[in-house]
Image: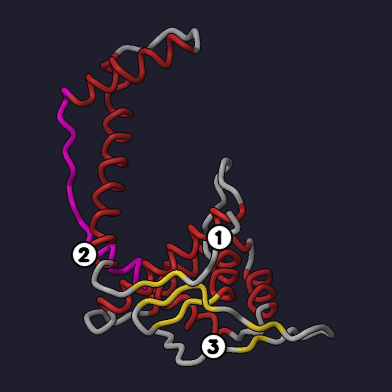
Amino acid sequence: MLIKALLALFILLQPGPILVDKIAATVNEEIITIHDIERAIAFFPLLRQNDESEEDFYFRILGELITYKAIALEYSDEFNLSEEDFEIVQTQILQKAGSLEKLLAVISGFSMNWNDFEEFIREKVLYEKVLREKFQMEITIPFNEIEEFFNLDYLPSQQRLGLEPRPLAEMAPGIEKYLRKLRTEKQLAAWLNDIRSNFKIEIKLRSRQ
């Protein structure tokens, strides 16, 4: 895990002013900087949503980094990371970059070498491993909930669109999958919030709103 004891100074490799990095948040004594957010946006497969402002996107990524750091503080002594663990996240990053050559160019653009890059992604690698091994659950969706969604959500939406609704028997598997995804996301969010509550988190980044 990357431990930042001091606020770093980052210098562009071309003529221009010196850029002073700013603290975006702290988790206990661990620091997350503006530069960390920018690198996360560049590397990780995190996409801005259609109705999401640039500022909201920025703060959402900061929230992700806070979660990664909280997980690292909670579980770093319990888990050892393997090459395979790194490869899972690196594959996602490579897919976003498009090729190894393009990824190396992005790494170089941040004045990083490959070791710097692996150190930066370490907390996300640990986060992904913890989810695989700690957050495992089988969620069963009762048929009455599927039927309720069909009657109260699916049928009215089809009527508003002027479309012929498909029968419940045909729609049930897709509805079950959708409801299971929502339930999993809700329980995951609650689990992560419980972990985050164990640490002192301070947001230093100010909203323009």
Task: Give the crowd class for mark 1: few <14, some 14-19, many >=20 residues within 10 Å.
Answer: few
Give the mark nearest the N terminus, 2 or 1: 2
How far apart are the alpha carbons under marks 3 and 2? 33 Å
- Mark 1 = which residue? 207
Front residue (pair 178, 12): 12
Query: Does the magenta segment cover residue 131?
Result: yes
Q: What's the residue type where badge 2 is placed?
A: Lys
* Residue 196 placement (x, y as % from top left): 29, 67
Task: Give the crowd class for mark 2: few <14, some 14-19, many >=20 residues within 10 Å.
Answer: few
* Residue 130 placement (x, y as % from top left): 28, 68
Q: Which residues are magenta?
A: 126-144
Q: Quadrant of residue 153?
A: top left
How far apart are the alpha carbons under marks 2 and 1? 34 Å
Give the mark nearest the N terminus, 3 or 2: 3
Query: Does the magenta segment cover residue 108?
Result: no
Q: Residue at x 71, y 87 (%)?
A: 11
